[in-house]
């Protein structure tokens, strides 16, 4: 916007606006405000039917302001309108920051959901592929994202055992007992664990009442 336009908006003389810019020049980089060169001013006047009225009858190229420069100008001028506008700009900025923070929260939640969906899709595809190709793992070393492969491998290993199975694990639950129920009737099962909780003891009793006993 031209300095003459802002003079009308802020109820301040053009001279006063330019004085404040010069006194606070460090606050007005070229991305905020700059003075048109003669060629630019001539071109602009040719596009404005009432150029004399717009320019206030002056021949010197005017200073122009970007939206950032207008906001900065409102903070350095002392007119009533400028002060009110400066306060409104700050209030709007605070409201915008609050809205942005909420949007960022929901964007993070959506990204988390999307990543979870991608992970589940990949796992389901791996399960289907294993079922279709019967491509069972040949290695007993697995990583965090190979839960299904590890489960299949351990089940297969349990089913192959003929004489005995010895398991050392401090995290025993009903899933472990369910896996061991798949063993052959000739294979004894022994588990070493750090602590037998009341829940594990109850699960073990129920298992042993239906399947070959497991010693813990």
Image (cartoon, grey):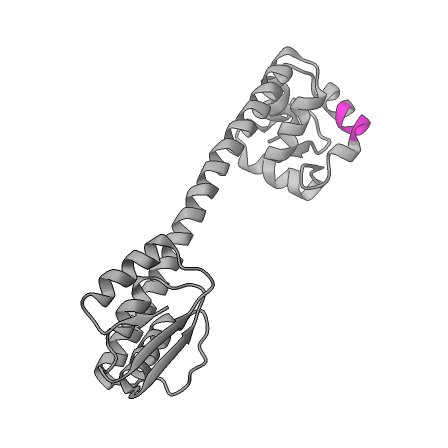
**Residue, far left:** 210
Q: Residue furthest right?
A: 23
Magenta region includes residue 22: yes
Name the foreground residue: 15 vs 190.
190
Locate residue 189: give its quadrant.
bottom left
- Residue shown at 64%/20% (left/top)? 7
* 25 vs 51, nearest the viewer: 25
Q: Is residue 44 above or below residue 192?
A: above
Left or right for 144, reference 8: left
Vertical relation: 75 (above or below) 186: above
The residue drawn where x is 65% and y is 38% is 41
The quarter of the displayed image where residue 79 is located: top right
Q: Is residue 169 left or right of residue 127?
A: right
Q: Position of residue 146 (x, y in %)?
A: 40, 73
Q: How many marks?
A: 0
The magenta stretch is 20-24
How far from the left and from the top, in percent, is residue 98? Answer: 50, 32
Q: Quadrant of residue 172?
A: bottom left
Q: Judge whether 143 appears above or below 136 on screen.
A: above
Q: Position of residue 198 (x, y in %)?
A: 35, 53
Front residue of this view, candidates 92 and 214 = 214
Please, is residue 196 above or below residue 100 in the view? below
The residue shown at (39%, 78%) is: 166
Q: Main secondary structure of the magenta part?
A: helix
Q: Position of residue 161 (x, y in %)?
A: 31, 86
């Amino acid at each position: 916007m031209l300095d003459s336009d802002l003079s009308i908006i802020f109820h301040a003389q053009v001279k006063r606006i330019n004085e404040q810019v010069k006194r606070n020049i460090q606050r007005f980089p070229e991305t905020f405000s700059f003075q048109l060169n003669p060629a630019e001013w001539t071109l602009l006047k040719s596009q404005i039917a009432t150029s004399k009225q717009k320019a206030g009858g002056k021949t010197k190229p005017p200073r122009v302001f970007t939206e950032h420069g207008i906001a900065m100008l409102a903070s350095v001028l002392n007119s009533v309108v400028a002060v009110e506008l400066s306060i409104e700009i700050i209030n709007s900025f605070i409201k915008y920051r609050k809205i942005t923070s909420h949007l960022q929260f929901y964007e993070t939640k959506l990204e988390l959901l999307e990543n979870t969906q991608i992970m589940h899709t990949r796992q389901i595809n791996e399960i289907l592929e294993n079922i279709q190709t019967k491509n069972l793992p040949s290695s007993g070393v697995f990583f965090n994202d190979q839960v299904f492969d590890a489960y299949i491998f351990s089940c297969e290993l349990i089913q192959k055992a003929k004489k005995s199975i010895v398991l050392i694990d401090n995290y025993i639950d009903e899933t472990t007992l369910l896996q061991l129920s798949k063993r052959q009737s000739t294979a004894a099962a022994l588990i070493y664990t750090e602590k037998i909780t009341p829940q594990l003891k109850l699960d073990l009793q129920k298992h042993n009442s239906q399947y070959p006993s497991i010693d813990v």
